[in-house]
Each structure stands twice: as C-alpha cells, then as structure tokens.
Amino acid sequence: MEKDSGQELLFTRRNGDVRGPYPAGLISRFLLIGRLTPDDEVSLDREDWRPIREQAHLIPNELKHADTPEGRERLLQARLREDERLRDRRAGNESGTVDTDRRGPDRRRPEPPEMISHRQRRAQWLSRQKASLDAAMRGPTPWLVAAAATLVAVLLFFWATDRSEPPPPPACHLPPAPEVNWSYCRMPGLDLRGADLRRALLRSTDLLGSRLDGAMMAGADLRYADLRRTRLDGADLQRANLTGAALQDAGLNHANLEDADLSYANLMGADLSGTSLKGAVLDRAIWVDGRICEAGSTGSCR
C-alpha cells in the first residue's frame, strides 16, 4: 500500500466489517483513543488489506514510544487531548462515563483509568456548578432573587440586541484573508509567507510543512491544527488559540506568541529562538525537550 501524503482516504476492517473511508489523520486519532487497534486492517481500495501496524505513517508517535514513563505520560496527554477534540463527534452521557451501550466495530476499547477519571472529574465539576446555581436561585433571600432576575433580564437584552451570526462553513477554496474559515481543511505545504490571517478559523487545519514566515495571525483559532515542520519565523500569533496544536519541529524563530494559548500543544523539537512568550499559557504543553509543562505555566515551561 503506497502512501498518498495529501489526499489519503482509507477504509478500515475488523472481523469482516468494513467502515470508512476516513482521512489518515482521523485513523491516527482513532488509534490514540482506542477506537481502532494496530491489529485492525486498512485499505485504499477495499481489496488490498494490510494491518495498521504495517503502515508506520498511521501510527502516532505517542504510541510508538509508550514503553517509557515519559512516553506513557505523553500518550496519556494525547489521549486526553483527543478525547476533548472528538467528544462532540460521538454520543455520550452527562455522567462522564464510557457509553457501554455502544455496539459494533466503532465501540471504543476500555480506556485507561486516568482518562475515565479525567472525564468524571469534569462532569462532577459541571454538576457542582449547576447545583450551586440552583441552590442560589432557590434561596429565600429577596435581594438574591431580585439580583438573579436582573441578571436574566440583562442577558436577554443582550441576546435580543446582539445576536451574532454563526460563522460561515469552512471554505477551503478561498484565498488567505482575515477571518477566513479554513477549519478542518487539508492544506499541507502551502506558501503563505506574509499572509494576513488575523482572526482566521484554522481549527484542526492541516498545514504540515507550510511556509507562514511573517504571517499575521493575531487572534487566529488554531486549536488542534497540524503545524508540524511549518515555518512560522517572525509570525504574529498574539492571542492566538493554539490549544492542542501539533508544532513538532516547527520554526518559530522571533515569532510573537504573547498571550497565546498553547495548552496541551506539542512543541517538541520546535525552534523558539528569540520567540516572545510573554503571557503565553503553557498549561501541560509538551516542551521542546520533551518535558511536560506544569499546570498553570505561563510565559515559560515550569
């Protein structure tokens, strides 16, 4: 099976059941969260089937190096990140537990205790916030009831007078421009040097190996974008949201990342020479040397 680096779509097979086609990147994510295993098979044409383990480009690096404590930590962080990323694509429940009623080949494998605990803690936190709000609204204090009623009235006023239009659907064919929506588009190897992409929607966009030297990307949404080996030297990424972005071996020489959100981003091997990180959030990011930044790291990896 030959790799088509740009447009590869693959079918999957388990116990004779064929699914897909899926983009190669999505298959890698399914491997991370356990929806697929290396023993499952893939095919470009539904005739030539090979085990996933024989397709090295599909195996995430986090799975390849999971035999060390550091590797296991990175694998867990990647699974938590992908769990957040794909949560809105699968049926779930409010308890934060795995849906055991799912059937068929897409049913997820048993998850590590850390992932289950992470989801349960999130659900418990949301439940506590809701309970606190409900209790406050039921309280006997007259001024509290009046304050709540006033708050509701203010929110309704702003909702009625400032109903923003939803963002347009992704338009991968459009040229670079401020606020362009390229979310989920596959655009590896593009030459976008000096492009104006301020406030652009680039969530989960594949920009692998692209040239973005000097690009203006202040306020851009780059959550979970694939920026591996991308040149961003001198780029303006102030206040950009790079949560979970893949920035391995990226060039960020003298880039401006002030007040950017790099939570859970992977910066292993990235060039940060002269990069401004003032106010940048590095919560649980993977640093250039493979260290996991502590929760609450800001401006530097602790």
Image (cartoon, grey):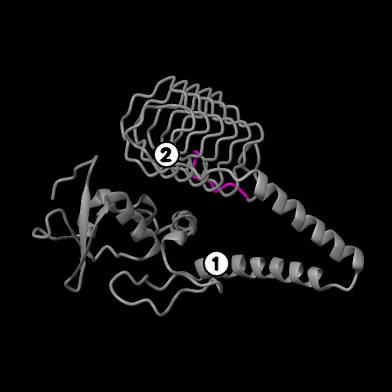
Q: Is residue 88 left or right of residue 136?
A: left
**Residue in the picture at 80% in, 61% down:** 149
Identify the mark at residue 248; answer none if there is no mark: 2
Q: Residue at x 23, y 65 (%)?
A: 40
Q: Secondary structure at mark 2?
A: loop
Task: Give percent across and percent down for residue 12.
Answer: 22, 62
Instruction: Specify the principal SS of the magenta part.
Output: loop
Q: In this picture, which residue range is highlighted in magenta?
A: 288-294
Whichever of labels 1 and 2 marks the residue nearer the N terminus, that label is 1
Cα separation, mark 1 vs mark 2, equals 27 Å
**Which residue appears farthest toward the bottom when viewing the image?**
101
Residue at the spot x=54%, y=71% of the render? 96
> Where residue 126 appears, x then y in whole percent?
65, 66
Q: Residue at x 48, y 55 (%)?
A: 81
The extreme right residue here reads 142
- The kind of residue on which mark 2 rests is Gln
| Residue carrying label 1 | 119
Q: Is residue 289 magenta?
A: yes
Membership of 265 in magenta stretch: no
Q: Amino acid at mark 1?
A: Arg
Please provide percent x and percent y for residue 219: 56, 33
In front of the other: 270 or 84: 84
